[in-house]
Image: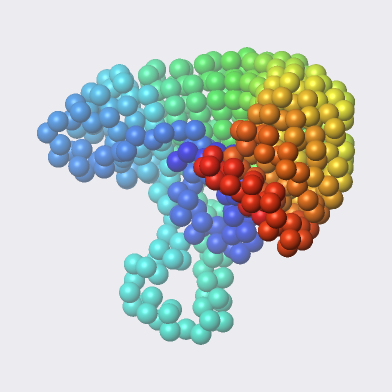
Amino acid sequence: MVVNRTNLITLDKSLHFFMEKKFIFLLAALLGYQLFAYAQVQKIPAMPAQKAIQSGQKDTIVAISMTGNVRQIPSWLLECKNLEELDITADTVILSAELKQLTKLKKMRIKAIPSKDFFSILNQDSNYKKYFDALPNTEKKRVQDSAFQAFQKSEQVRKPVYMKFNRLENVRWLDLASCYLSEYPQTLKNLPNLDTLFLSRNRISLFPKKIKKLKKLSALFLDYNPVAVKPNSFPKMKYLKKLSIAYGTMQEVPKSIKKLSGLQSLTLAGNQITTISPQIAKLQDLRQVIFYKNKLDSLPDAVYELRNLEELDVYYNNLKRISPKIANLQNLTHLYLSYNQLSILPNEIGSLANLQAMYIHHNQFLFVNTNISKLENLQVLHIHNNKLSLFPIEILQLKNLKELDLTNNAISDIPIELLQLSKLKTFRISKNLFPEDVKKGNTFQEIEKALSQRAGTFEY
């Protein structure tokens, strides 16, 4: 499942809606617990174990899925000499040194056997389903609520998956999402060449300091854990390049963040962060910083010192201003400032020569800074859901613009010169204050015709 950033935001909104309606388990079943962790991973279709056992060409199998506890390596598995991926759904997993024989095995996924929720039980028992369907709606809701509460309680007492690995030097990628882990599994020390580790959707409350023993770890995902950080939470991990702790309980970015000196991507979306340590400025290799949906009132100067930054995302915060020091971010290509309380951009915004996409919708803008006309490489500009009363003529200078969204403002006219933007393919301007004669006039018709010829879209 490949998810781009727009999908993530849409998915996030859906997730919170369903959470409010108390259908978490149904949503999880529908989405397969793959909201964030697998965003950039292409999964090889896995062969069920039973089919693999019966296969007469085990050396052609590259991916296998197994369900049921594994206390010893089955002999048939060792015959799959070209196995690259192994998926195990179990509550106990013991992997002995014999697994070393599978020298091409690089990826493993382990997850707990799913609990049976109300809907799965309902669908498996036709008599109970018939009884349930006959209930009045009010009684159905009472039964559903009661079943959900029971399900929640059973989930809270679920024991973590027991796992024990002998030394496996070939494994580079490990997914332990949804294993009910409350702490970092010590057995991971036996995977010395591990490069990527998913610990998302567990119960881990403290950043695991012993993870520093994985000297080659470059990507760590701790999303959807109640991870709390303290000033010295992060150990020295100079090889870690990507860290994601999304939708946790973090309230600050601590000073120990400087110990992750090789970090290139930092995702802390969906926390409650109000404070960012100045020590973040030490992370000069950072290319991507995501503070989406936190509680930031401002960005500290240290963020503007990340001179190699290419993507900055501060969607859904409480920002009222952007510092002129944004001019330091000369490598910035994507800037996400939407869903804040901004009413003005600094003049220095025009100095971001490499900027390709800027999202400033859902703010308080009455006008757009004239210096955006200097953004010669800008291709995407979203200013919808603001308070613009005039079409920003500065936009007419953006010769590389491909997508423009001005939906839901107070604009009443469009200049015909917009047609000079020869690369423009998507133009949205609905929910403004255009009189009917303007909508039916020559300018709208010419824009619609031009975009149609470019196989584009004009929404008004």
Q: Nearer the viewer, residue 31 or 367?
A: 367
Q: Is residue 227 left or right of residue 363?
A: left
Report whether residue 153 is seen. Answer: no
Residue 89 image offset from top left, x and y in percent = 37, 43
Which quadrant of the structure image shows residue 360? top right
The residue shown at (74%, 26%) is 375
Query: Which residue is nearer to you in this view: 165 or 458?
Result: 458
Quarter of the image where the C terminus is located: bottom right
Can residue 425 be spotted in the picture?
A: yes
User: Is 238 left or right of 102, judged from the image as shown?
Assistant: right
What residue do we see at 56% from left, 70% from top? 145
What is the basis of the colouring in this image?
rainbow
Provide residue 152's location: percent of width, then percent of height.
55, 59
Extreme-front residue of the structure: 442
- Above/below status of 451 relative to 57: below
Q: Position of residue 456 (x, y in %)?
A: 55, 43
Task: From the top left corner, tell me how far across and down residue 341 is, in percent.
Answer: 84, 45
* Quadrant hosting residue 419: top right
Closest to the observer: 91 or 334? 334
Q: 234 left or right of 342?
A: left
| 443 or 40, nearer to the observer | 443
In the rendered view, tell whether residue 133 sits above or below residue 459. below
* Quarter of the N terminus within the rendering: top left
Furthest residue toward left: 56
**Residue at (34% x, 34% y) in the render:** 44
Q: Residue at x 80, y 21 (%)?
A: 351
